[in-house]
Amino acid sequence: MTAVRGPIRSFDDALAALPAGFPADADAAFRHHRRLARLLDPATAPPGRTDQAAAAFARLSRAWQARSADLPVLTSPRHAYVLGPALAAGDLTTVRTAHYQHDGHHREAVLKIPRRPRDNDLMAHEAAVLTRLDTVGEPRHRAYAPTLVESLRDRAADGTERVINVLEPLTGFHTLAQVAAAHPGGLDPRDAAWIWRRLLTALGWIHRARLVHGAVFPEHVLIHPGLHGLVLADWCYATATGTHVPVIVDRYRDRYPPEIHDRAPASAATDIHLASSCVAELMGPQAPPPLRAFLRGCTLPRQTSRPQDAWGLLAELDELLDRLYGPRTFRPFTVPTAPDI
């Protein structure tokens, strides 16, 4: 059977589409189920229609269980994750969408699956870092990093074991690489300002937890345009302040500050250098001379000559922005919408 054609945007649309079943293509079927599950979840049902939603959701669950029998599933002691299509290919991992049931509700997840078993230690390291941020980092800033659902071990038929990190999905976010691609002539500094401010806030939070992210690159910085939110992703390169960054990302080798190539200990100044390079690239020729001078001071070769306190640097940036553009005002910001997955 094939799913109902046309957009499915409302609770009633989902009810109408339910009897038609799922597309034959596995990825399309996964996306169709994901869309229906979001709309039919009793927790978000329209007023007075919770019972109807519960019945429809149960019917959807039974139909999907039958349809997904031939889809790959990863199982942990806590959950069974039905794998969906690949979302992205990172430096070390393949990132896949997935869904699972928890407390009777449909839940979505993102699975980071290492392509090589030799990278299992980095996946375990990322899980440990995210756990440290949960326990040591200030809770009010926790949204600046992904949420770890669990870290599981999966053994393939050939005996190969992989450490897989399960994360809560980040809906509506775009990487700085995508933002830069959408603004090839450079981003207006007034729009880059809120991204820069959020990034420095995130770094201040990380450094207070005595951690260095170690890989603040455009693909690892995600923003939510409408909410002006920011998340730093890919924590397998993070390290404790005063220790070495465990791995260098080859394609960004030229962007690292000298201390990384010299195998010297990383510090808050390391992250500030990397973040400032991202912001400089994002604004490009749009940056006025005072902002370019500010960025140069953040990317000096000598680590001890750079700013060491992200939150202190944020205060200095705010003073400069106020002199250049006056009091802060909210500026709506958009990025071309990515396909629904």
Image (spheres, grey):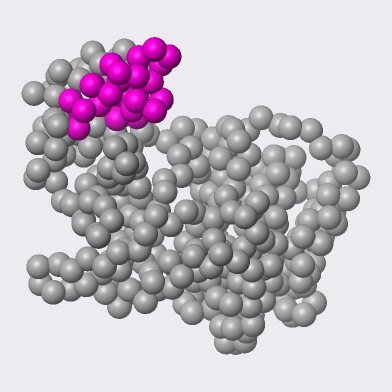
Range of magenta residues? 36-61
134 in relation to 15, above or below: below
Counting the numbered discs, the total is 0
Comparing 300 with 48, the one in front is 48
Quadrant position of residue 206: bottom right
95 in relation to 251, above or below: above
Give the image location of residue 290, x and y in percent.
85, 53
Is there any visible trace of residue 31 in the rendered image?
A: yes
Q: Is residue 229 left or right of residue 306?
A: left
Q: Is residue 315 left or right of residue 149?
A: right
Quarter placement of the C terminus: top left
Q: Residue at x 33, y 28 (%)?
A: 41
Is there any visible trace of residue 271 in the rendered image?
A: no
Give the image location of residue 203, x and y in percent.
66, 61
Q: Residue at x 32, y 41 (%)?
A: 103
Give the image location of residue 195, x and y in percent.
66, 47
203 in relation to 1, above or below: below
Q: Residue at x 36, y 50 (%)?
A: 110
Q: Is residue 124 left or right of residue 68?
A: right
Quarter placement of the N terminus: top left
Q: Main secondary structure of the magenta part?
A: helix
